[in-house]
Image (cartoon, coloured by chain):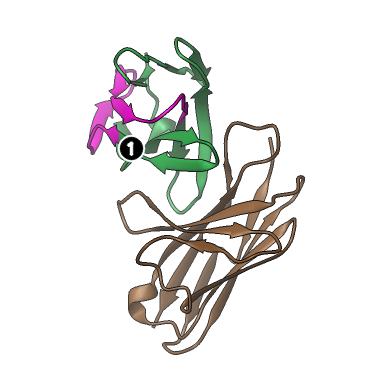
């Protein structure tokens, strides 16, 4: 079956620290992979995506590389800011169906 | 990017009443929309897939008579929580994937509180 396993939080970092949130997946076929971000009381917003192996998605300083050999899509950012505090969801899509990880809460302190 | 708009953002209702939540695709036509429920500090739980012009497909364990879904047009899907009870209090989110897009776009969510 299809599933996403995501690093459990919460994660607390100081401003300008390096961020990694691990994500691995199980899927049939060739899924597209996503990271979504959710701010308090809001819906999800697409952060970045990758549609095939070795693709790197990037946005707002965040990056993730589609690694087929390790079935992973880890999220990284070199220097986090207070405004990055949110919940991050890793997701995959096969066909018309999306599968989400459990979400990782990130708090960045000044 | 595409816009999915959800209304209302917050609603408080009395136990036993019904509440309707709207999900609109503002700049694209959506033959399929998805309804999720999110509990505090948890992931999204897919409740049902809304199909324009036909019946919704409900996930296992979701009561179709309690969570009525109507997708009467290509830009509007509604979720009606019937005879709401406090345990139905939750954050409900809809999403849709525009034609030609890989990603889904999400509504802002609706915080339902049943008192």
Q: Is residue B103 left or right of A35 when viewed as pictured?
A: right
Query: In the figure, residue A41 lies in which quadrant?
Result: bottom left
The residue indicated by pointer 1 is A3
Across and down, in percent, residue A91 comes to 42, 35
Across and down, in percent, residue B87 comes to 33, 75
Q: Nearer the viewer, residue A18 or A88?
A: A88
- Asked if residue B67 is positioned above or below residue B4 in the image, the reply reads below
Q: Is residue A86 left or right of B34 when viewed as pictured?
A: left
Which chain is in green here?
A
Q: Nearer the viewer, residue B88 or B14?
A: B88
Residue B86 in sight here: yes
Q: Is residue A10 magenta?
A: yes
Residue A79 in sight here: no
**Label 1 crowd bin: few (<14), some (14–19), many (20+), radius 10 Å:** some
Q: Colour of chain B?
A: brown
Count the numbered circles shown. 1
Residue drawn at x 32%, y 12% is: A69
Query: In the figure, residue A82 lies in which quadrant?
Result: top left
> Which portion, as a residue range, is magenta?
A5-34
Q: Nearer the viewer, residue B26 or A11?
A: B26
């Amino acid at each position: 079956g299809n599933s996403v396993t995501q690093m459990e939080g919460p994660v607390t970092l100081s401003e300008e620290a390096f961020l990694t949130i691990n994500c691995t997946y199980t899927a049939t076929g060739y899924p597209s992979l996503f990271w979504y971000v959710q701010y308090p009381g809001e819906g999800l917003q697409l952060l970045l995506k990758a549609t095939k192996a070795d693709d790197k998605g990037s946005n707002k300083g965040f990056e993730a590389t589609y690694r087929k050999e390790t079935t992973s899509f880890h999220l990284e950012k070199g220097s986090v800011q207070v405004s990055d505090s949110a919940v991050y969801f890793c997701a995959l899509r096969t066909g018309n169906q999306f599968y989400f990880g459990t979400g990782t809460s990130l708090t960045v302190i000044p | 990017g595409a816009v999915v708009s959800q209304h209302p953002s917050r609603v408080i209702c009395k136990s036993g009443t019904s509440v309707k939540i709207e999900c609109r695709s503002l700049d694209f036509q959506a033959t399929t929309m998805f309804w999720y429920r999110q509990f505090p500090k948890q992931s999204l739980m897919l409740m049902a897939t809304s199909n324009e012009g036909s019946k919704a497909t409900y996930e296992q364990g979701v009561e179709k008579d309690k969570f009525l879904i109507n997708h009467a047009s290509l830009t509007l899907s509604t979720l009606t929580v019937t005879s709401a009870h406090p345990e139905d209090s939750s954050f409900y989110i809809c999403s849709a994937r525009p034609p030609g897009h890989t990603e889904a776009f999400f509504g802002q969510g609706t915080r339902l509180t049943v008192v």
